[in-house]
Amino acid sequence: MSVSKGVVIYGQSRITYRVREVDRKTLAIEVHPDQRVEVRAPLHCDGEEIRRRVRKRAAWIQRQQDFFRSFEPRSPVRHYVSGETHAYLGRRYRLKWQLADREGVKLDGGFLRVSMPGNASTEQARRLLRSWYRERAIEVFSKELEVCWNSFETMGVPKPELHIRWMNRRWGSLSPRGRLTLNTELVQAPRECIAYVITHELCHLRHPHHGPGFWKQLDRVMPDWAARKRKLEEKMAM
Ligand SMILES: [Zn+2]
């Protein structure tokens, strides 16, 4: 087996792909969730032929990459200082440091108040905010999963176990063993967008891949999913 690389230019962008020669008759192009493009080609397949095939599928490859990219959190770098805005359930709040006897985070009108005793620091603010987001995420995601699950209950599969953690590249994932993992950061998005991510993942219970059956089920249980997805992209890019 040999491995090589190639690039094609498509419109304004370039598509980099990796070729793996394998013992098979036909050529297959795959786009992975991390947007990597992999070509599995028959042994001794001509490089020009591979390039031609990648170019021919370029529009499709980009659609796949855009799709996976839409799940990537794109929040700007945070400094956790007073005045900075932080989102929660689709609304923006202004961060406010305050000295207090006890540590705590509280929503108060348009403010997100972080109470810190003694030597307030960005590190302390960051730690408090992250654990506050985590607490909120556990509560909000559990509740949304409860509601979304109504559409899947009759499928006869057990309800996935919910896990929450900070992730860099994805909003959510579903393991083959039915474990639903959601990105803590998703709690910054509006509830309807959180429900969209959960519903998308629940559709994977029956359809592991994004094939026609997957989209059919998603359309059925959440007819307005595309609008929610767009809203998620817009809100989280701010
Ligand atoms: Zn998916």
Image: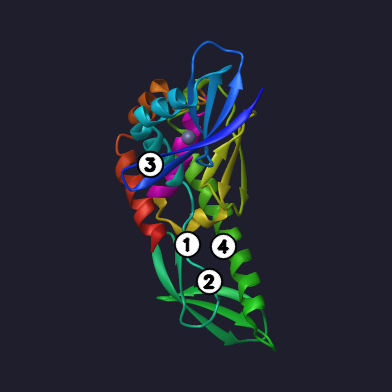
Q: Main secondary structure of the magenta part?
A: helix
Q: In the orientation shown, which residue stands out farthest toward the top?
A: 25
Quadrant of image for the N terminus: top right
Under mark 3, the amino acid is: Ile
The residue that label 1 is drawn on is 75
User: As drawn, is 103 to the left or to the right of 214?
Assistant: right
The residue carrying mark 4 has its beta carbon less than 8 Å from ligand 1: no
Mark 1 and mark 4 in contact (Cβ < 8 Å)?
Answer: no
Give SS at disc 4. Answer: helix
Is the CB of the residue bearing disc 1 within 8 angstroms of ligand 1? no
Q: Disc 2 marks which residue?
A: 78
Label 3 CB less than 8 angstroms from ligand 1: no
Per the image, label 1 sits on a secondary structure element best described as loop
Frontmost residue, 206 versus 32: 32
86 and 32: which one is in front?
32
Query: Of the numbered discs in the image, which one, if any, rests on residue 9?
Result: 3
Residue 5 sits in quarter: top right
For the magenta stretch, what is the residue range? Answer: 192-205
> Which label belongs to residue 133?
4
Residue 147 lies, in percent from the top left, at 45, 40
165, above or below 35, in the image: below
Foreground mark, 4 or 3, reads 3
Label 4 Cα neighbours within 10 Å, binned few <14 / some 14-19 / many ≥20: some
